[in-house]
Image (cartoon, grey):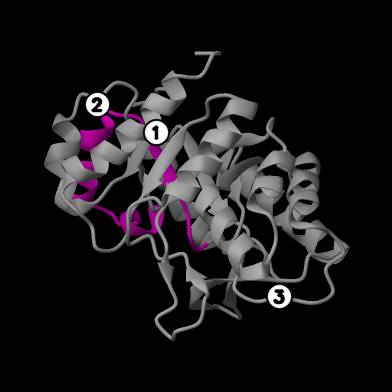
Amino acid sequence: MNTSLTQGAGLGLKADHYEAAYDCAAQGLWFEVHPENYMIDGGPRLAWLETIGSRHPLSLHGVSLSLAADCTPDIEHLKRLKALAERFQPTLISEHLAWSTWRGRYHPDLLPFPRTEEALQRIVDNIQRTQEFLRRRIAIENPSHYLKLPDHDFSEIDFLAELSTRSGCGLLLDINNVFLSAHNMGYDANAYVDAFPGAPIMEIHLAGHSVDPGGASLLIDSHDAPVAEDVWSLYQRLIQRVGPRPTLIERDDHIPPFNELLLERDRAQSLLEALPCN
């Protein structure tokens, strides 16, 4: 289904919800998947995605391109991603500002890096390679932070803004990442949201988080709980400034029934529809 994303709210698509997702007729609803879960040659998973894509717009949110790594993106991975995109015609493709591969080995985390001029140019090159290969603009997500790294040359917002300017990519602003990173690193989440450049934002993510089970005050981007009220407040603050943007509710663990997730999605949809520019 080659339909452009509305300015509405969507959900992360889960296998347990395929039938309910297909049947749902909510206005503006779209679904996002991790492409790595669908980079296969056939089978029921692809068949279901094709069926749902015939009714609802789809978005691909990658976790494995490792664009901040000290190497170029894996060509075989790019080929599989391009084949998937050509088959399903997603309205948006996004990735993380992180690295996860080293010398051909994949790590199970989205790892941080110092925001230096050297890193900026390397990531710009990797994004441009990816966009040229896919023949699509992609969006890059702001990371979650759990410890302070030394030797940054840029603030995160300046780094992302420069990354977008130099590479032509869009940005995906994850509000939960902003909230927990501000808590963990000791800065003002409201100030971050207010300073974030609005024009490059192609998508917004909302998710739940949890407290580190080790007993520290660290917040973890666990995607295993409803969106927190503080995150909803930041979201409303953002969209009142920048206007409506496609917004996703993420849930990757302790997944509730589809109708419970739909209630969160409907809350985001209501906030978007209440904006003056709608």
Q: Amino acid at mark 2?
A: Arg
Number of labels in the image equals 3
The label on residue 55 is: 2
Nearer to us: label 1 or label 2: 1
Q: Amino acid at mark 1?
A: Ala
Q: Earlier in the sequence, mark 2 or mark 3?
A: 2
Name the residue located 34 percent from the left edge and 33 percent from the top edge.
267
> Residue 106 placed where, x, y %?
50, 76
Q: Is residue 126 visible?
A: yes
Q: Nearer the viewer, residue 275 or 54?
A: 275
Mark 3 and mark 1: Cα distance apart in space: 32 Å
Which residue sits furthest bottom?
214
The answer to which quarter of the image holds residue 136 is top right
The answer to if 39 sits in the magenta stretch is: yes
Name the residue located 68 percent from the left edge and 66 percent from the top edge.
186
Q: Is residue 133 visible?
A: no
Q: Does residue 147 appear left or right of residue 13 in this picture? A: right
- Give the magenta range: 35-64
Q: Marks 3 and 2: in contact by CB < 8 Å? A: no
Judging by the rendered image, the residue that carries numbered circle 1 is 268
Mark 1 and mark 2: Cα distance apart in space: 21 Å
Secondary structure found at label 1: helix
The answer to if 133 sits in the magenta stretch is: no
> Residue 86 placed where, x, y %?
42, 38
Q: Is residue 80 above or below residue 200?
A: below
The label on residue 148 is: 3
Q: Amino acid at mark 3?
A: Lys
Q: Does residue 58 appear left or right of residue 161 in this picture? A: left
Q: Does residue 273 appear left or right of residue 126 in this picture? A: left
Secondary structure found at label 3: loop
